[in-house]
Image (cartoon, rainbow, N blue to C red):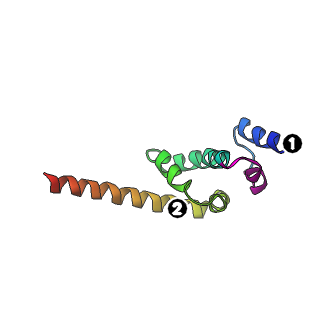
Amino acid sequence: RVREAVVSTQSTGNQEPLTPQVLNAARPEEQKQMLGEKLYPIIQSMQPELAGKITGMLLEMENSEILHMLEDSASLTSKVNEAVAVLQAHQQKLADQQKIAK
């Protein structure tokens, strides 16, 4: 029965909230997939160009923290902004290294 709940969550376009109970019923590799499917559209609306990269970064966090961010939009926005800052700093570092190499 629990497996059916997980499958129905995935097949209905992710309209149901992702609860800890639903998440815990899934295999570990499925859990990150399920979380990513919830995170990506939200992040894409904030940062379309970087959505895939930011989603991947956030999926490295603990599942409980990700669930909290899905429930608390201010927390998610803060983490997305933090990820953007990290990516921009990395891009700047690469650009600086290329200048030095020339």
Where 15 falls versus 82 (above or below)?
A: above
Closer mark to the observer between disc 1 and disc 2: 1
Q: Residue at x 54, y 56 (%)?
A: 58
Q: Label 2 amino acid?
A: Lys
Find the magenta span and give its range.
18-28
**Residue at label 2?**
79
Sequence-first tag of 1 and 2 = 1
Specify the farthest residue to the left: 102
Residue 25 relative to residue 79: left or right: right
The label number, if any, that marks residue 21 in the structure image? none
Q: Secondary structure at mark 2?
A: helix
Amino acid type of the residue that numbered disc 1 sits on in the rendered structure: Arg
Residue 19 is one of the magenta-drawn residues: yes
Residue 86's x, y, as percent? Answer: 40, 60
- Secondary structure category for the residue under label 1: loop
Residue at 58% of width from left, 45% of height from top? 41
- Local crowd size for mark 2, using a 10 Å CA cut-off: few (<14), some (14–19), many (≥20): some
Decide whether the magenta segment is chiefly helix, strand or loop. helix
Quadrant showing the N terminus: top right
**Among the 4 quarters of the image, the one containing residue 5:** top right
Q: Which residue is mark 1?
A: 1
Q: Is residue 14 left or right of residue 59?
A: right
**Image coordinates for residue 18, horizontal then vertical, percent:** 72, 51
Q: Position of residue 73 (x, y in %)?
A: 61, 60
Figure quadrant of residue 65: bottom right
